[in-house]
Each structure stands twice: as structure tokens, then as C-alpha cells.
Amino acid sequence: MILRFLIWALLSSSVCIAAEPILPLHSVATDERKVALGRQLFFDTRLSRSNEVSCASCHQLATHGADKVPRSKGVAGRLGDVRAPTVYNSVFNIRQAWDGKAIDLKAQVTLPVENPKEFATTWPELIATLNEDKSFVSAFEQVYKGGLSSDAISDAIAHYERSLITLNAPFDLWLQGKGPLSEQAQEGYHLFKYYGCINCHQGKNVGGNMFAKMGTFGDYFGDRGTPIEPADYGRYNVTKREADKFTFKVPGLRLAARQAYFFHDGSEQSLEGAIDTMARYQLGRSLSKAELAAIAAFLESLVGHHQEMTP
Ligand code: HEC
Ligand code: HEC
């Protein structure tokens, strides 16, 4: 009887957080006035040359902070070169973009502004447009010493993005001993660690803190069936180091269970398909259907909430 109780107590007690390779998400400090300005900019189509698109067109906050297509549409319907990742929890990434070409959130803002396939504009042109809006100009002057500038715009957007953190995921609550986690999700977490997914996808954001080659155990690009495109060279495009060819920032998996497409090339459409590809090409393993479902249940438990999301 006592033994039974001990086993029950052991199984039902929460895990020891300090020893876990994944940590609960938490909010980070932001300046509320900057967050408010940044939010306005994030949804403002005047940022694009044709007034057609805003950051929110591709990074849809009501769902998972990205869009439901393999390639996003910028001005004039031009398609991008890679799939749009989520902006939620991006503050925890070591670098921004698949190849890490932006050092932080603030530096990232210039990329869509100048990208001919996104906003297709220039800073002087964009600032001239926004300068016509007197209330906007004065709102900036109240918060930023130098008023409206590329630096202030980037800073405000970055502050807003710092506030986009998905909290209270069932997994995080369970880690903290505040809620239950299904047996299937617990099994998935065990497999995620046991098979070594955790070697790359780790920390608060379950990724985002290192770069890794796509295809450690197999020729992913050779097997993909479509020609290699410049964006497939990944980190190499930034560093020009041979060793960085086909290397990408390991994506955070917090909202992976909400995505419609996976990988930088958007080549995979199902979550279990993406897990299967990872097991084969990153770990040299073939997983059973039950194992794939368990890992998918674990990834589902990583989905937290933010006020911009529809419940
Ligand atoms: C036309 C669609 C589109 C628009 C508009 C757009 N983005 Fe993106 N965003 C993308 C794509 C595609 C990527 C991936 C780019 C890459 O890796 O080279 C991306 C990447 C990012 C990232 C990096 C996330 C990560 O995990 O690496 C952030 C942050 C981001 N965008 C924020 C913004 C902000 C802020 C704006 C508005 C100023 C914006 N985006 C406008 C499509 C878009
Ligand atoms: C060697 C490092 C490494 C290991 C091990 C690894 N991954 Fe990944 N994972 C990556 C990289 C890099 C990408 C991005 C590849 C790309 O887009 O081309 C990725 C992408 C993903 C994606 C798609 C996310 C998105 O936003 O498109 C999922 C889901 C995923 N991994 C789950 C797993 C699971 C589950 C395991 C274990 C079975 C695993 N990974 C093992 C490095 C790794």
C-alpha cells in the first residue's frame, strides 16, 4: 500500500523545472508607449509602397503570427523566397530570419521595408508618407526625442514584438506544477528528449537559439524533388562559409502545431509529416505512427495564448 502510494506520488508530482531542457515562457520588459506605437505601425498598410500590405498581412496575429501559405504575397502579389515564420516569441531568437541575417528585432524591420517582394519601398519614401499624418508625427515626438525616423519606427515595432509572447501553454503550466498534461503529450515530450530533438529545439522557445544543417542524416535537398534555390543555402548566404551551406536557424516550435506549412521552403503540409522528416533527416530514424502522434500531442501542448489571438 505504501509502495503504491509512493509510486502514485512520484508519477503525479510535477517535474523538477530546473532539470528540464525546456523552460516556461515569460514576458519581457517593454515600454508601453512604444508598444502602442509599434502596434499601430504593425497593422499600417502605409508602410508598403502600394498601401496594400502591412506586417500583419503576413504575420497574422489572430492565428499563429504567420500566414497559411508556403510563400507570402507582398506588394503587387509578388511571392517571397521562403515561408513566413511566426513573430510570436521571436524576441527569444538569437538572430532573426531563417538564415539569421538580422541581428535582432530592431534590425529586422528594414528587411521587409526594402524587400522588393514585401513593402518594396525605402526609408526616406516611407518617412515622407508618414510625415503627412500630423497626429502620427506628434505621437512619435512625444515618445522619441528625434521624432519620426527609421530608428524610431524600428524601435517601436521591436518593442511591440517584445510583447508578443504566448503564455500559459498547457506544457508550461504542467512544468510548473499548475496543470495536467495528457499521457500522450508526456510520452511525446519523453520521445522528444530521448531521440534527441532536444539537441536542437531547446530552451524557452523550443528552438531559436542555434543554427543547424537541414539534412544531417540524409540529402534533404536531393530528395525534395525540386531544384535547389538560392534561399536553400541558408546561413551560407550571410557568412559565405562553406560549412554554413544548407544551415538554418532552428525554428522555435511554440506555435508549430498551428502552422499550415513547415520548413523554410514550406514544402511540408502536415505537422506529423514535418516530425517524420525531422526524425529521418536530422536523426536518421524512422518513427512509428504512435510516436509521431505522441510528439504532435506534445507540440500541441506548447501552444500558449496572447491577447491578440482569437480564443
Ligand atoms: C510579404 C510578407 C511579409 C511582410 C509584409 C512582413 N513579413 Fe516578416 N517575414 C516574412 C518572411 C517570408 C520572413 C522570413 C524571411 C527570411 O527568413 O528571409 C519573415 C521574417 C520575419 C521575422 C523573423 C522571425 C524569425 O523567427 O526569424 C520577423 C521578426 C518579422 N518577419 C517581422 C516583420 C515585421 C515587423 C514586418 C513589418 C515591418 C514584417 N515582418 C513584414 C514575411 C513578411
Ligand atoms: C540537428 C538539429 C535538429 C534536430 C535534431 C531536430 N531538428 Fe527540427 N529543425 C531543425 C532545423 C534546422 C529546422 C528548419 C529546417 C528548414 O526549415 O529547412 C527544423 C524544423 C523543424 C520543424 C518545422 C518548424 C517550422 O516552423 O517549419 C519541426 C516541426 C521540427 N523541426 C520538429 C523536430 C522534431 C520533432 C525533432 C525530433 C524528431 C527535430 N525537429 C529534430 C533542426 C533540428
Image (spheres, rainbow, N blue to C red):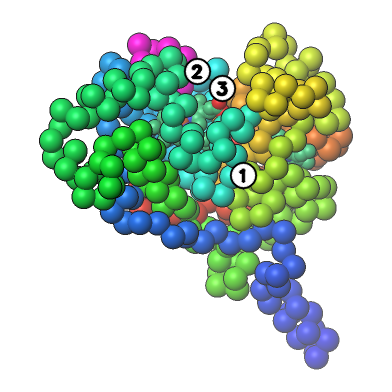
Q: Which of these two is toward me, 244 or 308? A: 244
3D distance between C-alphas at marks 2 and 1: 23 Å
Magenta stretch: residue 95 in it? Answer: no
Residue occupied by mark 2: 80
Mark 2: few/some/many CA within 10 Å (<14, 14-19, 20+) = some
Q: Is residue 104 above or below residue 133?
A: below
Residue 50, position as x, y percentages in the image: 28, 16
Instruction: Give the residue pinned by disc 3.
Output: 82
Q: Position of residue 287 (x, y in %)?
A: 80, 39
- Residue at the far bottom in the pictured view: 2
Furthest residue toward left: 134
Q: Position of residue 92 (x, y in %)?
A: 56, 49
- The local crowd at label 3, few if under 14, some if 14 to 19, many if 20 or more residues have their Cα within 10 Å, is some
Dot 1 corresponds to which residue? 94
Which residue sits at x=49%, y=41%? 105
Residue 112 position in % (x across, y down): 43, 26
Residue extending furthest top? 227
Tell me if label 3 and label 2 are in contact, CB under 8 Å. yes
Q: Secondary structure at mark 3?
A: loop
Mark found first going from the N terminus, 2 or 1:
2
Query: Where 210 sits versus 230, above or below?
Result: below
Magenta residue check for 79: yes
- Do we see residue 272 in this rendering? no
**Comparing marks 2 and 1, which lies closer to the viewer?**
1
Q: Amino acid at mark 2?
A: Gly
Q: Secondary structure at mark 1?
A: loop
* Ligand 1 within 8 angstroms of badge 2 C-beta: yes
Q: Is residue 148 left or right of residue 112?
A: left
User: At 77% from the left edge and 24% from the top edge, which residue is drawn?
Assistant: 241
Amino acid tagged 1:
Ile
User: Marks 3 and 2, how far apart in space?
Assistant: 6 Å
Find out if the beta carbon at label 3 lies less than 8 Å from the nearest ligand 1 atom: yes
